[in-house]
Amino acid sequence: MWPWGHAAFGYVLVSLGSRVVRGKPPSGAAVFALLFATQLPDLVDKPLSWVFHLFPQGVSVAHSVFVAVPLGLLVVVAAYRFQRLEVGAAFTVGWWSHLVGDVGTALLYGFGPEFALKRVLWPVATFPPYDDQQLALERIAEYLGEFLATLSTGQQLGLLAVYFGPFFVAFLLWLVDGAPGVRELRDIANG
């Protein structure tokens, strides 16, 4: 799943959850926490693998349910203690939705459940190391090239729907929610 897909999926979950639990859209602070958390597993694991070569693949510690579940629960408890439960919950939902999105995307691509679940079971399950020692930018370019090549096949309409449909739905929902976060950004810009 690409970054915008993780952000969109997480936003839909947090927005709908906020409406059910609190009866109103998420706050700007919750949206910022969510957006950061939806990217967190890749921001941690990709550099640890691609730049520092500490892990053989770009899915390891931050993609692991064995790390994400206890730390996510700890964030919620701490947020509750500091009366910022909405922000802590949004962060945790964002992180966990990233893992669910990666598993779901693997299943959509036709990989079996064993492969899909292996993505979130580090260190119990791991992938073999990359065949080469590409630089991080080379690996990103390779992934982007594969994505663009896939879009030029007969699968492009389905892939466009999978990759950009949730983003479009999330964007519309964000507008309906009153564009949370914009006011906070405007306040920061105006000092």
Image (spheres, rainbow, N blue to C red):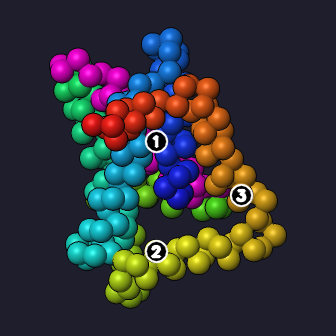
Q: Is residue 177 above or below residue 22?
A: below
Q: Is residue 145 visible?
A: yes
Q: Considering the numbered disc 3 on the image, is that residue within a helix, a strand or a loop?
A: helix
Q: Judge from the rendering whether residue 100 lies leftward or rightward of residue 121; answer left or right.
A: right
Q: Quadrant of the C terminus?
A: top left
Query: Which comes sooner in the sequence, label 3 or label 2?
Result: 2
Please tell me the numbered disc located at residue 176: none
Please tell me the numbered disc located at residue 160: 3
Residue at the farthest bottom position: 132
User: Which of the pair 55/147 is nearer the observer?
Assistant: 147
Write down the residue under mark 2: 140
Q: Is residue 124 visible?
A: no
- Magenta-colored stretch includes residue 107: yes
Q: Quadrant of the N terminus?
A: bottom right
Tell me where the magenta segment starts and ends, as one range: 81-108
User: Which of the pair 31/58 is nearer the observer?
Assistant: 31
At 77% from the left edge and 73% from the top edge, which residue is drawn? Answer: 153
Q: Is residue 2 above or below residue 89?
A: below
